[in-house]
Amino acid sequence: MKPLSLLLTLLTSPLGISALPNPLPQDPTPTPSPPVLPLSSSSRWILDSSSPPKRIKLRCLNWAAHLETNTPEGLHRQSLDYITTWIATQNFNCVRLTFSSDLTFSGPSTPVHTSFTQVSQQQSKPALLNEIYPSIISKNPWITPNTTTLDIFAGVVDSLWSKNIMTILDNHVSKASWCCNLTDGNGWWDTAAGYNPFNSRFFNTGQWLKSLQFMANWAKSHPGVVGMGLRNELRAFLLQDLNGRKDWYTNIQKAGNLVHATNPNLLILVGGAQSSTDLVHLKTKMLDTSGWQGKNVWEMHAYSFTVTFPDPFKNCDLVKAGYGFWSGFVLEQNKPYTGPLIMSEFGVGMQGSDINGQFEGLDEKDHRYLDCLVGYLKGNDAEWAVWAIQGSYYIREGTVDYDETWGLMDHEWKGWRNSKFQAKIGDLYKVTQGP
Ligand SMILES: *[C@@H]1O[C@H](CO)[C@@H](O)[C@H](O)[C@H]1NC(C)=O
Ligand SMILES: *[C@@H]1O[C@H](CO)[C@@H](O)[C@H](O)[C@H]1NC(C)=O
């Protein structure tokens, strides 16, 4: 999640390819039965292991677990079972679960209680330990004084999988904290050209690789994990990306090879530069994905603030051409870069003003953005993960029990924050194409 406008604008020609491969109408209902794992990619599709293989369309939500406590959010408001049941009954089939590299260094053997104690002290927020932690225990008595942060990840992933919900682990940041801005130190590899401490001071390349390896290995004993996002929203700053994306190619290839060698079952999700909005360089030079053949999936993010025109969504065709030009082109078949594409972050604030009455609680610009984006994804029948389930956080940016106005769930994690949102994105659930 990147609450900043990108420098990126619609520098695309309106003739940019909008990637509409031949539609082959298929089973219009979402997959009702559990997927047969592992998953793989073939052309632009994600397939399961049944025989013959079936297309799996990923319909995911994001679930934050990368903030300071290294604990998946929400357990102070509801039981784990309540939350995962809600996800399953709302017809999602997967969760993009975010984690920090920190989790695997300080975190895995750290009891949750210790983690909350430390963050509470570091940030001088006694309420985190004295109020939030006890409510986690009271809602989730399965958490004991010995339960570690990684045990909670296991609890989440296994509970989801018991309900046929798959998990994609997403390496979201290095230093556990809210993401992403150009000075948070998590943006671009510290070993890359043009070192810039503001953007890279926490992004230790070696630790990042170890962290991916650790989680890929861990996932072997948690069968619901179907994929690994190598890094969320890579973003260079100032002089960091002036070498033809050399550092991107080098590091992504290393990470993909390592994750695949560690756990060959996982899909490998690769986002572009400029905060996962820009894969344009693949048109001239394909990434060497031979180390994880049949597993590669591209990632793309798009928010209403991703484009900086006053209101570009007044011309949806132009926006769609931009999506196609920057990222969507990877869906074109029979190209070196052809692969499945997951829009792994998009979303809106749920509490805007009611301007046109068609969708209460959404600003007019967000309303147009969402219509345009849903139209684009529907036309391409792409995979997706909406940002984000969390209605509140244990602590975010120094605020205890922070209210997330973008949350799919309300502050109490009881149900939809905006009852009309799901219908608004309803077209995304449909499967309209297939291999
Ligand atoms: C926690 O761990 C300690 C030491 O391993 C053990 O003695 C104790 O029984 C454990 N407590 C619980 C509640 O599991
Ligand atoms: C950027 O993020 C860091 C870490 O979350 C935070 O400390 C800083 O205040 C943020 N800067 C801006 C301009 O929001």
Image (cartoon, rainbow, N blue to C red):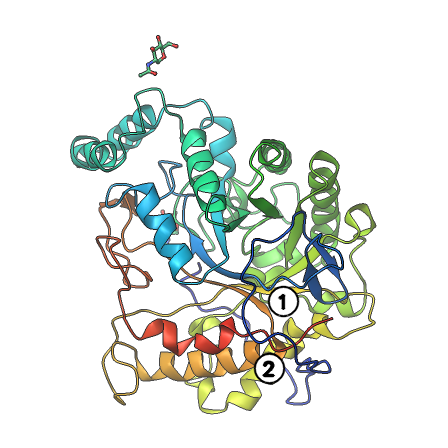
User: Picture quarter containing residue 367?
Assistant: bottom left
Task: Judge left or right: residue 129 versus residue 299.
Answer: left
Name the spot of residue 13 as percent of width and height, x first. 66, 87
Q: Give x and y (percent) for residue 174.
A: 51, 40
Residue at left offset 57%, top offset 58%: 238
Q: Secondary structure at mark 2?
A: helix
Where residue 78 appears, as percent x and y from the top left, is 26, 45
Mark 1 residue crowding within 10 angstroms, few (<14) / some (14–19) / many (20+): many
Task: Say what amino acid the circle numbered 2 marks.
Answer: Gly
Which residue position holds label 1? 278
Which quarter of the image is occupied by the N terminus?
Answer: bottom left
Residue position for label 2: 379
**Gap between marks 1 and 2 measured at Cα:** 20 Å
Observer-side mark, 1 or 2, equals 2
Disc with the residue nearer the chain's start (1 vs 2): 1
Q: In the rendered view of the protein, which quadrant contains the C terminus?
A: bottom right
Above-or-below relation of 94 to 305: above
Q: Position of residue 385 (x, y in %)?
A: 50, 62
Question: In screen coordinates, is 126 left or right of 61?
Answer: left
